[in-house]
Image (cartoon, grey):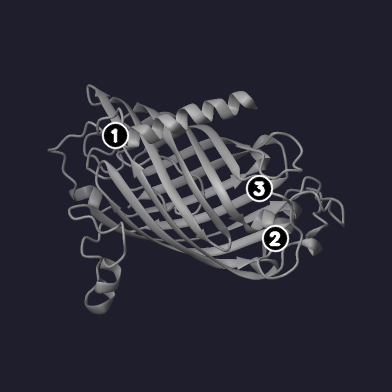
Amino acid sequence: MSRLLSTFTTFAVGSLLAATGAFAQPAATDASASTARARSAPVFTMYFENDTFTGTDQHYSNGLKFSWLSADLTDWGQSGWRKNLVESLPFVNRPGGQKNLGFAFGQNIYTPTNSEVANPDPNDRPYAGWSYVELAFVSKTPDISDTLALQVGIVGPHSLAEDSQRIVHRWTDSARPRGWDYQLRDEVGVNVVYERRWRLYGRALYNTLGIDLVPHAGVSLGNVQTYANGGGTLRLGLNLPSDFGVQLARPGAIGGSPTDDLDPRVALNRNFSLFVFGAADGRAIARDIFLDGNTFRDSRSVDRENFVADLSAGVGLIAGRWQLTYTQVWRTKEFKTQRGDYNNFGSVTLSRAF
């Protein structure tokens, strides 16, 4: 575990130093690259995350998210008071950049280690579900992307997480989860999320083989999750897409659209990409309802860790306008009484540029 944390620390600190310009230069981009097709390409993305990929069924048990990111809306597609309201938002109104609106909805499911007992261990992670909708505003250039997102949803029985898990377990002939009577109570949840991503170190060999580094830093504020995070993604492959890397189905993840017409999803002379990537993300956490319990009502809870890190590795494939990625994630200990030093799960994203 110490090696895992050491690797994360080295990668994350290096990425953030690069992002602040301590020893980095902007990505090598083709200044003459057109953006006409990239600006007119909305992207639909499906995220599916589950610990079944790693042979377990515990803690972060399942995540499902569907997102739509619009084509470029330089004037935000509005007029009057609505345009004035959107243009007053911080961070996402950089002149000259592409501007996109995103919409998503999803559901996360959290369970203890043993889901077959009717009264779960009170020292284990509580049962919890989170169903939400998300509205995002994105402003990006080839080198920098800013995302400001609002999540609104419900934690508790009306998230329908219990029903979802039982249906899937019935379909897969898995053991019936029996402890949902002890899940968190109903609570309306709100998160406001901001994240900046940089694209650095872009290099190409004969405009084919490329490598880039995509550091990120952000913050989430709300009664569901309050944290500050930072990290980065390193990609290597053929015909790298001109976006800001693969994301997990977390707050602010709204899919990635091309920033220029060299992206193989919209390029005229290339429609294929194969790449591998490694990523790290660390969060300093002040609030996590899924561990801390309900805000205003008594519920099950555990003592959370204040710092949690993810290390991940994966592979991506682009064929035509479709992109498919698989990510393997290792997450450090999330609460004091957790058994073992880390959890792992798999994440699949499937997206299409239109």
Task: Give the quarter of the image for residue 153.
Answer: bottom right
Q: What residue type is labelled 2?
A: Gly
Residue at the far top in the pictured view: 205
Q: What is the secondary structure assignment of the residue under circle 3? A: strand
Mark 3 crowd level (few <14, some 14–19, many ≥20, 10 Å Cα):
many
Identify the residue shown where x is 25% and y is 59%: 93
Identify the residue shown where x is 75% and y is 62%: 183
Rounded to the nearest angstrom, the CA distance separating label 2 from label 1 is: 40 Å
Residue at the far bottom in the pictured view: 81
Which percent across, then down, holds residue 148? 38, 58
Q: What residue type is labelled 1?
A: Gly
What residue is disc 2 on?
293
Task: Tell which circle, 1 or 3, labels the residue nearer the N-terminal end.
Answer: 1
Which percent across, then down, holds residue 116? 84, 50
Drawn side of residue 159 relative to residue 29, left or right? right
Q: What is the secondary structure assignment of the residue under circle 2? A: loop
Q: Using the image, tell me which numbered label, if any, was put on residue 215.
A: none
Residue at the far right in the pictured view: 118
Rounded to the nearest angstrom, the CA distance separating label 2 from label 3 is: 15 Å
Q: What is the secondary structure assignment of the residue under circle 1? A: loop
Task: Tell which circle, 2 or 3, labels the residue nearer the N-terminal end.
Answer: 3
What residue is disc 3 on?
60
What residue is disc 1 on?
21
Identify the residue shown where x is 53% and y is 33%: 312
